[in-house]
Structures are given as structure tokens and as C-alpha cells.
Amino acid sequence: MSQEWNIRSRGHVCTICEKPLLDKTPVVSALRETNGGYERYDCHPECWKTAERDWEPFSQWDGVYLAPVKEEKKDPLKKEDAGELIRKLITLDDPAMKNVVYVLAVMLERSKILIERDAKPQPDGTIRRVYEDRKSGDTFVILDPRIRLENLAEVQSQVVALLSGTKTLGEVAVEGSPAEGATAPEI
């Protein structure tokens, strides 16, 4: 699969019965791996249990459906926050930014904005981590680049520079990505 990460938004109707999901009710979410990426399923628990499938989910989790809340308009001059930045980087799909994307995901997980739902080792030795945004329900499939501990400070400074607005995405991408290592300690 060429994409190293992607976003799948939470559905607002059951993928199986097509009835609306109700606010603050249980929901089963699953990702199905396809040739073109991932399909997301959001279903009533009863529908998920009784549906016939000839496939196994790439990842599956139980959650609570939260109806979308209308957000206020944002100030166009406001600095980006980590959530906006990770969405922008994922949309760009630039492999040179994979370390920055991963560090942002870990930051958002530690800030309790993202929840890690699954970690899937791949045949090539990489790990794809499935994160869900607590508020929006968006799902992110992010490559864990196994950043070496000696390279972590450089990646963290890139993230700080992007969040503070002192560097652009282009400037950070030109700096280059730190070396990877499959045997490196995880952060």
C-alpha cells in the first residue's frame, strides 16, 4: 500500500442497516483493508454481530457515538494546533514528514485527544497504528517509523517549529528526516 497514513471520518449512519446512529449510544467501528486503502464501518452493535462477512477487520473497536457539534468559525490568523497540523500533513501524504506525523500523533495521544485503537505489525516489519480522535471520531492510520532515540530531539524541534510558525512545512521537509532503525527503542 503506497499510503503510509490516512484519515477516515466517523459515519453518522449504520454502515449495515443505514439507520442513523444516536448520540451517546454504543457503536462498533472497524477498518477493512482494501486494495485502495481502508474502508471504515460504523455500526449498531446488533447489526455488527448479525451481519454476514467473508472478511476479517484490519482493526475493530467498541465506542460511543457522539453526534457532531457545530464548531465556531476559527480566526484565520490563529496559529495551527497539533490536531490541525497532523490533518494537514496526512492530507499532503509526504513520506519525508512521517516522523513528524508520528510524533504529533503521540503528542495528541498523551494529551488524550487521540486514542490508540490498534497496532498492526506488517509483513515488511513496519507497524501501522490506528488512532481515533475522541471528539470527531476521525480515524488515522499512521506508520510508526521507529524513530531512533538519538534522532528524537531533532524531530521534536521540527514539530515545535511547525506549531510555533517559525518554520514552514517546506523548510522542515528540506531539513530531511532522521535516520530510521528497526531495532531502535520505541518512544
Image: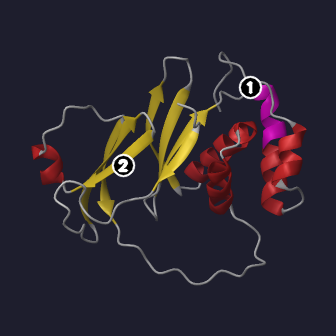
Residue 59 numbered tag: none
Percent x, y of residue 71: 52, 80
Q: Helix, strand, or loop for circle 2?
A: strand
Q: Give the range drawn in magenta.
A: 149-155
Magenta stretch: includes residue 181: no
On screen, residue 46 above or below 127 = below
Q: Which residue is drawn at 67% across and 45% down?
A: 101
On screen, residue 75 above or below 178 = below
Which quadrant is the C terminus positioned in? top right
Q: In this view, does 66 lie to the left or right of 53?
A: right
Q: In this view, does 50 lie to the left or right of 38?
A: left
Q: Helix, strand, or loop for circle 1?
A: loop
On screen, residue 71 above or below 91 = below
Percent x, y of residue 28: 26, 51
Q: Residue at x 65, y 45 (%)?
A: 93
Q: Residue at x 78, y 78 (%)?
A: 77
**Cα–Cα gap, marks 1 and 2:** 32 Å
Most common SS among magenta residues: helix
Q: Which residue is drawn at 27% across and 31% down?
A: 56
Q: Nearer the viewer, residue 94 or 57?
A: 94
Q: What residue type is disc 2 on?
A: Arg
Quarter residue 88 falls in? bottom right
Q: Nearer the viewer, residue 162 or 93?
A: 93
Percent x, y of residue 48: 18, 47
N-term mark: 1 or 2: 2
- Which mark is in front, 1 or 2? 2
Q: In this view, does 41 lie to the left or right of 120?
A: left
Local packing at callout 1 (Cα closer than 10 Å; few below 14, some 14-19, many 20+) is some
Percent x, y of residue 7: 51, 51
Would you name the residue on which mark 2 appears? 40
Residue 148 numbered tag: 1
Task: Tally the numbered discs.
Answer: 2
